[in-house]
Image (cartoon, coloured by chain):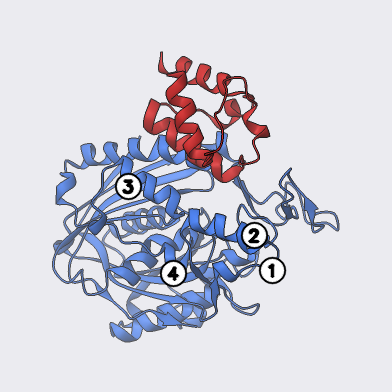
Chain colours: A blue, B red
Amino acid sequence: MALITFNNIGISALSGAVPSNVIKNYEYTEFFTSEEVKDVVDKIGIVERRFANADTCASDLCFAAAEKLIADNIIDRSEIDLLVFISQTPDYRMPATSIILQERLKLASTTMAFDINLGCSAFIYGLSVVYGLMQTGCIRKALILDGETRSKVYSKKDRRTAFIFGDAGVAALIECNEKFGKSCFSFNSDGSREDLIKINAGGYRNPSSAETVVEKVVDEFGNIRSDEQGYMNGGDVFNFVIREIPKDYNLIFNYAGVEKDAVDYFVFHQANSFINGYLAKKLKLDIDKLPSTLEKYGNTSSVSVPLTIVSELKNKLDSQKTLFLSAFGVGMTWASAIINVSDCHISEMIEV
Amino acid sequence: MEAKFLTMFKEVLEITDRELLLEDNFRDYEEWNSLVFLSLIAMIDEEFDVIIEGRDFKQLKTNAEIIETIKKLQS
């Protein structure tokens, strides 16, 4: 069982960047009627999203967030020993985007840098990887850059995914300090459900070809996409979430020995309002402790947990607070964490 | 339980002008779609405390078959 505890490591600062281009979902009627759009949007509760333009990558959003983080917190770049870039929408298939960001951010060539490709739960996974390296005591400061441009992944003509996803990037500064105390993590994976959310072509199992870029009608509802675009089986994902997340929620609280009442904020992956609302009801969570960015940013995959903290908890994490984090998605993978923050500096959200 | 399921499913489908029958093929309802599927899963979890796996649900055609599956999972 992957239950892990770290001591005296935490997030000391966070910043976020979103594209300035706002997509209004109720008006997103290029391929569907207003009535069809309303049915979907009412259900998923995502009113607006941000779409990066053709020239903007996840790394650009992260770069902007990182520069803001460094400036606002007067971080000495030479003290950053570790840079982890989290994304499933990298700049290239190679090299790793983290390496490009090391140069753009003018970090030393002695910086350890690598990418993590995992999907919606990746921020929590990434935190644990960085915490693990920092536990050695050999790393002074670490940057986690987490960005996605999911708007470029899904078909506009597939109503199962056309209204859900948005783009964003965050930067997090991780440091060692006794004020953070204990943090606990739980990790899970289930490859038997690898086909619930997937892009079939473009990797090395099904390489890109003239065939893979052709748009096709894929179901009885007339949804259209190519094999190079992502798909999601929403019903099965929902089934998975209501089966597994409550289990993991109870497991981590038992493991950590923390009372649920001791948590100040429950930050969930922002999937859609139907899933998140049902989960909150099932877990009997207090709505005041449940920050949400679904309405304004939609589902930004791995970015949604830290983006929600940047957007909704700014100025609320000045004193010592306990956060519960939970994220789930493509893989399937799911993870949860109970972490402490103390005087966490959150920058003003920037638009790119 | 049959009556309870049919009443709840009718609400999920937002049908007001007719009754659902056990032998109905729910996939033929004009109101049936992937959004309704989500609400049905939630309703079954909430009211009957079971979760029907997607691959099992794909095999089901009638309301009676859904009820039978719920009973099987409950026992």
Compute the Cα span from label 2 to label 3.
27 Å
| Residue highlighted by disc 3 | A280
| Residue highlighted by disc 2 | A154
Residue A130, relative to residue A235: is it above or below?
below
Work out whether mark 2 precedes mark 3 in sequence or the reverse, and give the earlier one. Answer: 2
Work out whether mark 3 precedes mark 1 in sequence or the reverse, and give the earlier one. Answer: 1
The verdict on a common chain for dots 2 and 4 is: yes
Chain containing the residue with disc 2: A
Q: At which x and y percent is residue A40? A: 56, 55
Identify the secondary structure beneath mark 1.
Answer: loop
Identify the secondary structure beneath mark 2.
Answer: loop
Residue positioned most to the front:
B17
Compute the Cα span from label 2 to label 4.
19 Å
Q: At which x and y percent is residue A232? A: 60, 48
Q: Which is closer to the viewer, label 1 or label 4? A: 1
Res A315 visible: yes
Kind of residue indicated by mark 1: Glu
| Residue highlighted by disc 4 | A296
The verdict on a common chain for dots 3 and 4 is: yes
| Residue highlighted by disc 1 | A30
Work out whether mark 2 precedes mark 4 in sequence or the reverse, and give the earlier one. Answer: 2
Compute the Cα span from label 3 to label 4.
19 Å
Work out whether mark 1 precedes mark 2 in sequence or the reverse, and give the earlier one. Answer: 1
